Image (spheres, helix red, strand yellow):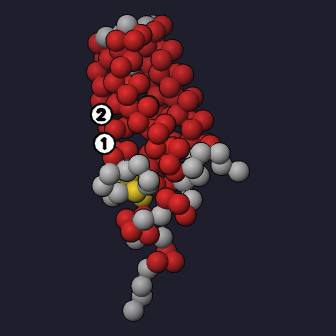
Amino acid sequence: MKMLSPRAHGFVDYAVAALFLLAPSLFGFGGLPETLCYILGAAHLGMTLLTAFPLGAAKIIPFPVHGAIEATVAVLLVAAPWLFGFDEEPGARSFYLVSGVAVGLVWLATDYRSSYATTTASARYRPEHRSFS
């Protein structure tokens, strides 16, 4: 059973975007980890605004696609310190590891197939809504 509804997930998404945008100041790291945080925060905010779920503004990205992107990002966040060479910076390394695990747990707890998330945009990608006439 998935514990997070699409609406609850939306609130978490906006908090995650804010955390990424604030993390370099809160945890005192700079350079590449800082730049990646700003990119990730802006990208996450943009994806959230474009997602077809209750708290999305434009409702373009189907919610299950949003989930697939988050699953991929969770893995990349955990690997980022080694992929980008900042594994020797304890503050940045810890932030990315904890963030990756947290995003992964949110992904596991979210009901990406909820009918509550279905909108016109996401219905286009569901086979039962396709017309073959």
Callout 1 environment at 10 Å: few (<14), some (14 to 19), or many (20+)? some
Nearer-the-camera pick, 121 or 101: 121
Q: Position of residue 4 (x, y in %)?
A: 59, 45
Is 114 rendered above or below residue 27? below
* 132, 8: nearer the viewer: 8
Residue name at image x 62 percent, y 43 percent: 109
Is residue 43 something one can see in this rendering?
yes
Left or right relative to 4: residue 84: left
Viewer-closest of 46 and 89: 46
Q: CA distance from mark 1 to mark 2?
A: 6 Å
Q: What residue is shown at x 39% (from left), y 12% (from top)?
A: 26
- Residue to which mark 1 is pinned: 46
Q: In the rendered image, which residue does mark 2 sit on?
A: 42
Compared with 2, 29 (above or below) is: above
Viewer-side residue, 81 vs 42: 42
Callout 2 environment at 10 Å: few (<14), some (14 to 19), or many (20+)? Answer: some
- Please give the label number shown on residue 29: none
